Image (cartoon, grey):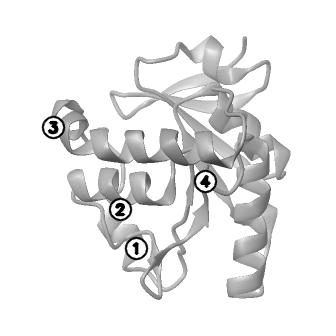
């Protein structure tokens, strides 16, 4: 979506956030069989969870709350990661998230960072910051569409690997 000027962007933002309470009940979602719960991961000392999303911070918070995931991606009461209200290009969102990790944790080891996603943009943004990626074929995109020409680990919603994805 193209927005010309901050006034237009602010109107789009307000419209989106005002509509979320009516749209959230229609969103379906469930944990993929075989996956580790977010609660299990967020309770570990050796794991930090963050979000990379084109969504707005407040939109992400509301969606997480709808699915009972609020609190798992917070650091000091703030959502941790990169968000679409700071950058509109997903690769820039990922770069900002990487910088957030570096600043907050004084750490960055790309081989220990995973992006888990279900869209081609998720795979692309992981590549932009040089981290590992696990694509989950939830049905919105095919394995080949998600792979974006890369050899990546791709899981189906059955919770079992569907092999290396190639487009």
Q: Nearer the viewer, residue 141 or 80?
A: 80
In the image, which is nearer the foreground, mark 2 or mark 4?
4
Q: Which residue is mark 3?
A: 25
Q: Residue at x 74, y 40 (%)?
A: 89
Tell me which label, 1 or 4, sits earlier in the chain. Answer: 1
Horizontal and vertical percent for residue 132?
A: 72, 49
- For the C terminus, the image quarter is top right
Q: Which mark is residue 38?
A: 2
Q: Which residue is mark 4?
A: 85
In the image, which is nearer the foreground, mark 2 or mark 3?
3
In the image, which is nearer the foreground, mark 3 or mark 1?
3
Question: CB under 8 Å between callouts 1 and 2?
Answer: yes
The secondary element bearing badge 4 is classed as: loop
Q: Residues within 10 Å of mark 1 (few under 14, many from 20)?
A: some
Q: Which residue is mark 1?
A: 42
**Residue 117 visible in the displayed image:** yes
**Residue 67 visible in the displayed image:** no
């Amino acid at each position: 979506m193209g927005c010309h000027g901050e006034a237009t962007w602010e109107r789009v933002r307000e419209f989106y956030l005002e509509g979320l309470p009516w749209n959230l009940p229609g969103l379906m979602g469930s944990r993929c069989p075989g996956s580790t719960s977010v609660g299990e991961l967020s309770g570990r000392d050796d794991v930090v969870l963050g979000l990379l999303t084109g969504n707005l911070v407040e939109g992400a918070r509301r969606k997480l709350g709808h699915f009972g995931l609020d609190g798992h991606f917070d650091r000091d009461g703030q959502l941790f990661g990169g968000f679409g209200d700071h950058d509109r290009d997903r690769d820039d969102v990922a770069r900002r998230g990487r910088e957030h990790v570096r600043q907050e944790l004084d750490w960055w080891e790309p081989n220990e960072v995973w992006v888990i996603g279900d869209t081609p943009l998720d795979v692309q943004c992981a590549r932009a910051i040089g981290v590992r990626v696990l694509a989950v074929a939830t049905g919105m995109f095919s394995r080949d569409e998600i792979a974006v020409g890369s050899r990546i680990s791709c899981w189906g919603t059955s919770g079992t690997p569907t092999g290396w994805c190639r487009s």
